[in-house]
Image: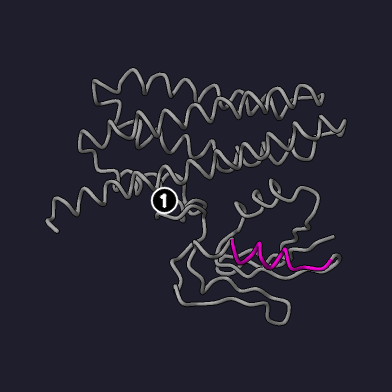
Amino acid sequence: MTSQTTAAAAQQTAAQTVRDHHERLVRTLNDHAVTIRRAVDRLSAPAAVQKKLVAFCTDEVLPHAAAEEETLYKAAAELPEARLLVQAMRREHVALRELVAEVESARTAGEAAAAAGALDALFSAHVEKENDLLLPVLLDTGVDLRAMLAGMHEHLGAQDQGSCCGHACACGGHGDPNATAEVVDGELDVRPLPPAQRHERIFATFAALALGTSFVLVNDHDPKPLRYQFAAEHPGEYTWDYLESGPQVWRVRIGRP
């Protein structure tokens, strides 16, 4: 394989990394919005889920958008064929922030569901433009996406290390592909596992829990994104209690009430 082919493959891998992270963000935001809508359909107050959606956007979606503006958008704004697109997408970032504020300030179930639905629709359409329009332009003009990802990593900080390094979730290091993790003395230590295997193992352990029991997750980073996934997939069906919060080790007791 020539160096040129290797570089092109690395560029495509970098682009796919961005798309994979976008997919996770879109899926999680959509899960929260759907949960709010279902709560309203059941005539239940969606306040708890409303807070989770705002927290997810504040902790992940909006910082990701800001990092994109300082990296991908800044590079694309220098290209004549992408300048207007970048202007429009920056305006959509403003609209996203306004909609998150609307979700947070909603005082009725109807207001919360409407704002969450609008936020979900806008973010899905926005990400589609990034994937289908912005990334291809950057690739075609030879912009170094790998350097862009490193720049996003710097702007996001440690909370998004995994996704910027090519993983679909913020799972820290790379791990041993042959490693296994089992519950020992009530603890599930996933640190030896590759990032791609961690969430699957954690959810399998949770699925095996009897009602009223729990296990302690041991990890090498704050598993906030995992908590959002639990909130989206198992609302009201789990407990989450931090026992240790870094800086090297995090322990979280996850239970089935």
Left or right of 79 on screen, residue 112: right
Q: Residue at x 81, y 26 (%)?
A: 109
Question: Which residue carries the number 1 mark?
Answer: 164
Q: Is residue 236 above or below residue 198?
A: above
Percent position of residue 171, x then y: 52, 60
Which residue sits at x=25%, y=43%? 144
- Whole-percent x, y for residue 140 in the image: 22, 34
Front position in the image: 206 or 153: 206
Magenta-colored span: 200-210
Q: Amino acid at mark 1?
A: Cys
Q: Is residue 74 left or right of residue 99?
A: left
- Location of residue 139 (image quadrant): top left
Q: Residues within 10 Å of mark 1 (few under 14, many from 20)?
A: many
* Secondary structure beneath label 1: helix
Q: Is residue 201 magenta?
A: yes
- Based on the displayed image, in which of its 4 quarters is residue 176 positioned? bottom left
**Residue at image x 81%, y 49%?**
236
Q: Is residue 65 left or right of residue 221?
A: left
Is 177 contained in the magenta span? no
Above-or-below relation of 124 to 227: above
* In the rendered image, the vertical position of residue 170 relative to residue 52, given as above or below: below
Residue name at image x 66 percent, y 62 percent: 203
> Quadrant where the C terminus lies?
bottom right
Instruction: Compare residues 148 and 212 and report the one nearer the observer.
Output: 212
